[in-house]
Image: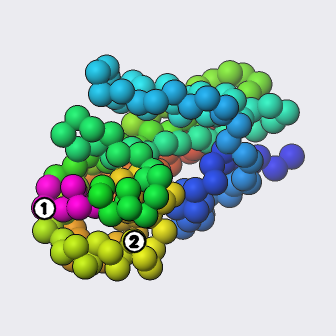
Amino acid sequence: MTKKLLLASSSPRRQEILSQFKIPFSLIPNLIVNEPPISTTSNILTQMRRLAKLKAESSAVNHSEWILAADTIVIFKQSIFGKPSSINHAISMLTTLSGNTHRVISSFCLYHPITKKTITRTHSNLITFSSISQNDILNYCKTATPLDKAGGYGIQDIPDTFIANIRGCYYSVMGLPIKFLLPIIKEYDIV
């Protein structure tokens, strides 16, 4: 029987990363019903790992292969920037992030429904934006898809001029800390 990794995510970025690293996977729906909000009043990394675990466990119904679930958030000055609710919200987020440094935290959970083995990891990155003109922000929001991305942007589709500095892992900012995932997949012979 062929081993499979099941990705419980609709994120095209996570699919792209797995494909780029030649990790075979199948998509399954993320079945979490009530996603708990992340709060800045307690340990964010712990909350992120817990959320990824909840997503994986919730999506395990009728499956017997390893399940991968993940989550990404943007934090700036103790405020959490999730996915914007509108284009105006995305514009507001990007305007706030312009000229400043923010954190992007990505977490993932590998969960095996039969053995109940659970492996979670988080990765924190620091991104410094250049001072971005309002016109450039408006153009990006009109031509890209900021509504399905934490912080209103995707590192892979914003203009290079938006970024002054990245401290961390590009793929983690994109939504999946692949440098942590690859050794685990190898160690546990997942695919």
Residue 81: horizontal and vertical position, in percent?
35, 45
Q: Is residue 135 left or right of residue 49?
A: left
Q: Residues within 10 Å of mark 2 (few under 14, many from 20)?
A: many
* Residue 127 picture location, percent across and down: 22, 55
Gap in angstroms between the C-alphas marked 2 and 1? 18 Å
* Mark positioned earlier in the residue sequence (2 or 1): 1
Residue type pointed to by label 2: Cys
Residue at figure coordinates x 23%, y 44% from the top left: 76
Q: Is residue 41 above or below residue 148?
A: above
Per the image, label 1 sits on a secondary structure element best described as loop
- Compared to residue 78, the image places residue 88 above or below, namely below
Q: Is residue 28 magenta?
A: no
Instruction: Please report the residue visible at 72 percent of the width from the left and 53 percent of the height from the top.
Output: 27
Q: Could you say where residue 187 lies in the image, as x and y percent from the top left? A: 55, 38
Compared across the picture, whether 31 is left or right of 38 comes to right
Residue 189 visible in the picture: no
What kind of element bears circle 2? helix
Q: Is residue 97 magenta?
A: yes
Amino acid type of the residue tagged 1 in the rendering: Gly
Relative to residue 40, is residue 87 depicted above or below?
below
Could you say where residue 3 lies in the image, as x and y percent from the top left? 76, 46
* Residue lying at 13% horizontally and 68% vertically, measured from the top left: 131
Q: Which residue is mark 1?
A: 99
Query: Which label belongs to residue 15?
Result: none
- Marks 2, 1: nearer the viewer: 2
Q: Which residues fall within the magenta stretch?
A: 94-100
**Residue that mark 2 sits on:** 141
